[in-house]
Amino acid sequence: MLKIRLFFFGLFLALLFSVHAQKKSFNTELLAHVPFTERSAGCWGFEKDGIKYAIIGNFSTTLIFSLEDPKNPRLRYSASGTNSIWREIKSFKDHIYVVTDQGQDGLTIIDMSKAPETISHSFYKPVLTVGNDTHEMRTCHYNFIDEKGFLYLSGCNFSQRGVLIFDLKPDPKNPVFVGAADQAYSHDTYVRGDTMYNSEILAGRLAFYDVRDRTQPKLMATQVTSRAFTHNAWPSDNTKYVFTTDERSGAFLESYDISDYNNIKLLDQFRPLERENDGVIPHNTHYLNGFLVTSWYTDGIRITDAHRPDNLVEVGYFDTWEDPAICHNGFNGCWGVFPFTGSNIIYGSDINNGLFIIQVDYKRACYLEGAITDGNGNGISNARIEILSSQLNKAFSGANGIFKTGLASSGTYQVRITHPDFEAVEKIVALEHGEVMELTFQMVRKNSVSLKMNTIDVDGKPLSAKVLVRGIANVYNLETDVNGVLSTEILAGDYDIFVSAWGHKVQVSEKANLNENATLAFVLDPGYEDNFENDLRWNVVNSSPVISGSWVRAKPNQTEYLNDLIANPGVDGEDSGSFAMVTGNGSRGADCDDVEEGRTVLYSPEMNLSKYAEPQLNYDIWFFNASAGAPLTDTLYVKLSDGMTEVIVDKFYGATQEWIKVRNKSIPTEFLSAPGIKLVIEARKRVAGTIVEAGFDHFFVSEKVVSSVQDNSYLKDMTIFPNPAETSVEVRLENISGEFNKSEYQIFDQSGRPVLSGRVEFNTFAIDISFLHAGLYTIVVPGHKVQRFTRI
């Protein structure tokens, strides 16, 4: 691994959770798991006298486990060495060879000739001349040993850090230096026959070398991989194909046709669809009998059927790492995998969680291939093909309409073909393991219709408005002009229409049938309202230009924290549509795109509230605050500002775990006639080490309604958190009239004596109970259900 990111946040809890989290698997079974107190790196396998061994490189040692019983690995030897986050391992005959990319161990050679009773190790550190560079060999990044007994060391501390070649056959304990391929830095290499496949990661390419003369390797061809950061490569058994990984966030496992080095072709790309938007990183892939067994950092071990290299289909996986608090696009989790055990058992190494012994049910994929055409037989590109199954899958047709996809399980399935310009098509298909079902799907082009729209206010005056026309396959973001008019062409279909203009209430027309020419008119009532389906230009100001977790308008993308807590919401508030304002909208992992230390502030456009008699604020709020030990002092503020003065009207602590509906919030009288009033929502992280996420949606201003009848029989909800509590409790009230300054809370002890009281100013407020004696207490707030809490 070229670059390591160390995540110190919540280290102990993260490690504890990742080790004991429920592992997800498919066509695999966990046989044994050996955790360690230090991080792990590469792994390999070895066999002698009928005993199989799993070898794993840890931070300070190389550990050798015998597997007489694969469910009970037995530690046979520990070869201590320099501290290094990189350790890679290979074997030749009765010896194991280990390299590190830190320290001064050179090449560690472990003698297994008398294993398991006697195992020993030594360090090989020759003085070599590579190019014009002469000194002792101390570090190497990777090693590989071919079938001819030659050792290849990548990224050693010489010259360009290319590949050093040694002959192991004369004396396995004293390799003989033969030559070097030193044109570029080598991160990883594989050799079969007389061809070397060299992953030159910094050059972003896979390089092919002729090594018939290993004293002078010759470069034959190069291929830049899709993310230009080639980490490793492994050829098929017939060497017509090669499979590569790029060690980049969101990168692919890729297959190439290399039968002609003058015309190398990219055939297919694969990455786990469950993590498609999380930016997971592939690390090492291996080819075994037509299958690719690949380690993905935060996504475990993925098994892909590569018998058809132009149609890679996932057929199994085992997740060795799961920590919802940490970003899934980083360098945690599965480092390496060894599938060459001669059986269906594989070994996996996980940076955080140690050694895994896993049994794999290798099953051939079921293939669906064919073409998508129009009524004239012409290929349709970019049509989406989905087999409706519990296994996530999707494919898109190419420029000529050709598509290739598949599943891991046989059976009868419904296939759905969609394209924004064509009517959807569905068919029933029967799929079998190892067989290709070939089908042609014909699609009918949708008709275009004319859409004309007028937007006016209640006085009949033209009003420029934002218009969202959203269907299943097509979305149009439109805007009426200064005369309140738009005219455009759209594809026929059913659409939801959202019409928004600041200073007016949102108009929504759901499931509008627009299968023929249509002229629509919308009258927008006065009032301040926003469901955030259209962009009405709320402004974001951050405490730092580079702060993460800044307010964005988006469909909320759920993130999780420990113990199944939700950090970023997964749905919008209780209004029409699906958009909301959220602080960042990152990938899995609560710490991935939350608010960093500082604040992100959301400002509404200006409001003039003078036309209201008694205006009141209404909105939906989400707030999440947690940590693995840091004090929770972060806050979400709702304020009003006249450009000179800001006044807090609401604030939230803790974790709501749901959208809180704030209704009928009174506005301070000094803002009722002031021009240019703005609503301000501020999410603030005060100290490092905490998670802060916030959401804001369903905003509107209402007029106060005075009822002549008071219904005292209805009591609203009140929640207490935490309970039991030691130093303080957080009280959250269901929305009331907003007249908080006229209410007080009271706390009574078990004998009914009042021990504490205070003013209720916000929906959510904290109470210091550190001075109370341990015991059961009752809290009373007028109009709310009585609640009890325990002071410990």
Image (spheres, grey):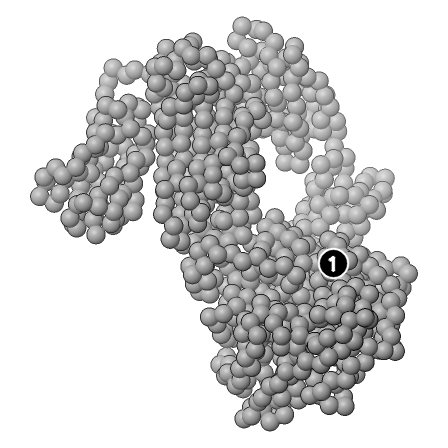
* Along the line of sight, the residue nearer the viewer: 581 or 200: 200
* Along the line of sight, the residue nearer the viewer: 375 or 403: 403
* Coordinates of residue 361 in the picture (x, y in percent): 61, 71
* Coordinates of residue 638 in the picture (x, y in percent): 40, 29
Q: Secondary structure at mark 1?
A: helix
Amino acid type, mark 1 = Leu
Look at 74% across and 32% down and name the residue there.
446
* Along the line of sight, the residue nearer the viewer: 238 or 55: 55
Vertical comparison of 545 with 202: above or below:
above
Would you identify the image quadrant in which residue 610 lies?
A: top left
Look at 44% across and 56% down and name the residue there.
10
Please give left or right for residue 288 compared with residue 773 in the image. right
* Coordinates of residue 458 in the picture (x, y in percent): 52, 9
Quadrant containing the N terminus in the rendered view = bottom right
Vertical comparison of 374 with 222: above or below:
above
* Along the line of sight, the residue nearer the viewer: 4 or 457: 4
Which residue is denoted by mark 1 in the rendering? Answer: 202
